Structure formats: C-alpha cells, structure tokens
Image (cartoon, rainbow, N blue to C red):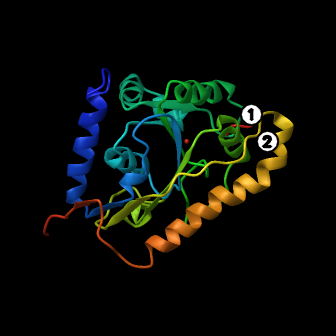
C-alpha cells in the first residue's frame, strides 16, 4: 500500500460494503484502467454518491476535483484531503485548481473530473463546462470515460434521503485527444473535444442500459467538481 493512502483505502472499503444496505453495485471495465501512469477519469454526475462509489471501486486511487464548499469545516477538509480530493471554486476562474490537476498528472496520478460541473437535476447528461474541456485538452493524457447509472434513483440531487436501488459503473476504453499545445489550438479543438467526450459518455450510458452482463465486481444487496482560464 502506498504511503499516505491508508485512509483512502479504508474509506473505499467502507463505501463498498456500506452500499450493500442500499442495493447492488455492479462494475464493468476494470481492465481498462491503466496500471501505471497518469490519466484523466471523466465521469457523468447523477448523485452525491458518484465520487464515493467510483473511487471505492476503481483499482487505482483517483484524485478528484470537488467543489470548495465541501472543504468548509476542519473535519470535512481533513476527510476530503485524505481521500485525495482537492477544491475548485465553481462559476469562476480558478487557476490554482488547474495547476493542481496538471501537477498531479505530472506526478503520474489519476485525476477524476466531472465535466458537467455539478449533479444533474433530472438524471440526464448535461452540457459540460467549457473550461473543463480546455483543461482536458491542455493535460494531453489518456482519458478513461466513466459512467455511473442508477445513482440518481438512489439519491437524487433534490432529495435529502437515500433510497434502495442498484448502481452500475462502467470504465470505458482509454482514448486520447489530438494535442492542443496553446490556447488558440485549444479553442479551435473545443467543439471536437466536447463532442468526443460527451458523445462517448452518452453512448456508454446507453449501452449500459441495454442489458446486463457478467460484471468484474458484484456486490449483492442485503435482503429486506468552472475552470475558464486554461
């Protein structure tokens, strides 16, 4: 176990097992996660459960961008930092979070970003934040598309309580976007990159809803993160 990751792995273990109280967690595509080297994990965002469950089942620690309000108290700040999350200020320019993403990628880490920037109000895939797509282009690392389906039904944004239900997580095949070395190149590539990223997530979500197959991980149920200056 890597030094400094003990709490992360404990939290992941607890999340996997506590979710049994709410339903079944099904995971596909674990073989698509690179064993070494940096990558960006880009996921849709249906529920507050998404980062908890995705990080709980991903075979590599994921350093996840999270809204700064989640770091508001000393206890939550300590927890968030120990599960390798770092703050981003939404709806405004935040160059510090951009530097944080690039630094952790340079260190060979996996970084998780939710391109929509916030949880969906209706469970459907929303438009991405343009600054996030610019950051992805600037990073120039492999991209793992990750989709989570069912978490909206278990704990939607507008509800205060968790419900019983099943959640499926799919890690898709890695892909890369063409290099965009400067701001002008990133602006020119923005429509293509947006279409590629969000189209991949949408197709992956649709495929996941088309039926079930043997999963890599199956946890049965019990009876009963705006970046504009990039």
Judging from the image, what secondary structure is the residue with disc 2 in? helix
Is the N terminus in the top left, top right, bottom left or bottom right quadrant?
A: top left
Q: In the picture shown, does residue 19 fall above or below 9?
A: below
What residue sits right under mark 2 in the picture? 186
Looking at the image, is mark 2 or mark 1 earlier in the sequence? Answer: 2
Image coordinates of residue 75 in percent, x first then y, are 35, 25
Q: Residue furthest left?
A: 223
Q: Nearer the viewer, mark 2 or mark 1?
A: 2
Image coordinates of residue 185 in percent, x first then y, are 83, 41
Q: Quadrant of residue 165?
A: bottom left
Visible residue check, residue 167: yes
Visible residue check, residue 125: no
Is the C terminus in the top left, top right, bottom left or bottom right quadrant?
A: top right
* Number of marks present in the image shown: 2
Image coordinates of residue 54 in percent, x first then y, are 39, 49
Local crowd size for mark 2, using a 10 Å CA cut-off: few (<14), some (14–19), many (≥20): many
Judging from the image, what secondary structure is the residue with disc 1 in? loop
């Amino acid at each position: 176990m890597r030094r400094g990751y003990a709490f992360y792995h404990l939290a992941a273990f607890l999340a996997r097992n506590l979710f049994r109280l709410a339903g079944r967690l099904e995971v596909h595509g674990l073989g698509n996660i690179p064993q070494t080297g940096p990558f960006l994990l880009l996921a849709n965002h249906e529920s507050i459960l998404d980062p908890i469950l995705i990080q709980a089942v991903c075979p590599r620690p994921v350093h996840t961008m999270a809204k700064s309000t989640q770091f508001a108290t000393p206890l939550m700040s300590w927890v968030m930092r120990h599960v390798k999350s770092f703050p981003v200020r939404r709806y405004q320019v935040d160059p510090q979070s951009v530097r944080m993403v690039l630094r952790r990628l340079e260190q060979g880490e996996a970084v998780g970003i939710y391109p929509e920037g916030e949880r969906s109000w209706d469970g459907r895939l929303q438009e991405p934040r343009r600054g996030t797509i610019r950051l992805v282009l600037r990073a120039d690392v492999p991209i793992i598309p990750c989709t989570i389906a069912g978490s909206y039904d278990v704990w939607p944004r507008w509800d205060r309580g968790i419900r019983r239900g099943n959640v499926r997580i799919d890690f898709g095949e890695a892909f890369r976007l063409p290099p965009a070395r400067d701001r002008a190149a990133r602006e020119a590539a923005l429509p293509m990159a947006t279409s590629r990223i969000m189209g991949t997530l949408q197709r992956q979500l649709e495929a996941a809803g088309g039926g079930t197959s043997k999963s890599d991980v199956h946890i049965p149920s019990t009876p009963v993160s705006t970046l504009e200056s990039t």
